[in-house]
């Protein structure tokens, strides 16, 4: 009987050792995963920053070219509006005044 109790206690001790080892392995794995995730994240951010720095001059040049086109279009539109006002300004003013005072 004593021998049987001794075997049960020994089996329980071994089971606890195995459980403790598994728990320690789990904690270590979680730490490794956290560290590896941070390494991957930092690597990705570093590559993204380099790609942004490399593409920035091209993007800036494209934006400047686009802005020049838009600026030219607005200048042409402004010129057309000024010309139209020179032609029709007096008539527009007269029409607006007449409508405001109810004539």
Image: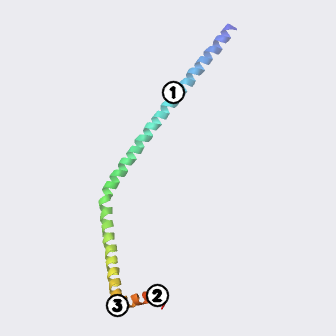
Identify the element where label 1 is drawn: helix
In this rendering, the label closer to the viewer, 3 or 1: 3
Q: Residue furthest top?
A: 2
Camera-side residue of 31 and 66? 66
| Residue denoted by label 2 | 101
Q: Residue furthest front?
A: 101
96 lies left or right of 82? right
Mark 3 or 2, nearer chain start: 3
Mark 3 or 1, nearer chain start: 1
Q: Are marks 3 and 1 in contact (CB under 8 Å)?
A: no
Q: Is residue 40 above or below residue 99?
A: above
99 lies left or right of 89? right
Neighbourhood count class around disc 1 (C-alpha, 10 Å): few under 14, some 14–19, many 20 upward: few
Q: Is residue 92 above or below residue 5?
A: below
Q: CA distance from mark 3 to mark 1?
A: 88 Å
Quarter of the view holding residue 90: bottom left
In percent of width and height, residue 82 lies at 33, 84
In percent of width and height, residue 49 lies at 35, 51
Neighbourhood count class around disc 2 (C-alpha, 10 Å): few under 14, some 14–19, many 20 upward: few
Identify the element where label 3 is drawn: helix
11 lies left or right of 24? right
| Residue denoted by label 3 | 87
Quarter of the view holding residue 18: top right
Identify the element where label 2 is drawn: helix
> Which residue is drawn at the image coordinates 60% and 21% (left, top)?
15
Quarter of the view holding residue 6: top right
| Residue denoted by label 1 | 24
């Amino acid at each position: 009987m004593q021998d049987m109790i001794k075997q049960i206690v020994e089996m329980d001790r071994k089971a606890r050792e195995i459980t403790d080892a598994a728990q320690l392995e789990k904690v270590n794995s979680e730490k490794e995963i956290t560290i590896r995730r941070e390494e991957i994240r930092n690597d990705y951010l570093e590559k993204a920053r380099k790609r942004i720095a490399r593409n920035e001059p091209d993007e800036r040049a494209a934006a400047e070219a686009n802005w020049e086109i838009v600026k030219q279009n607005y200048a042409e539109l402004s010129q057309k509006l000024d010309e139209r006002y020179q032609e029709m300004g007096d008539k527009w003013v007269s029409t607006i005044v007449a409508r405001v005072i109810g004539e």
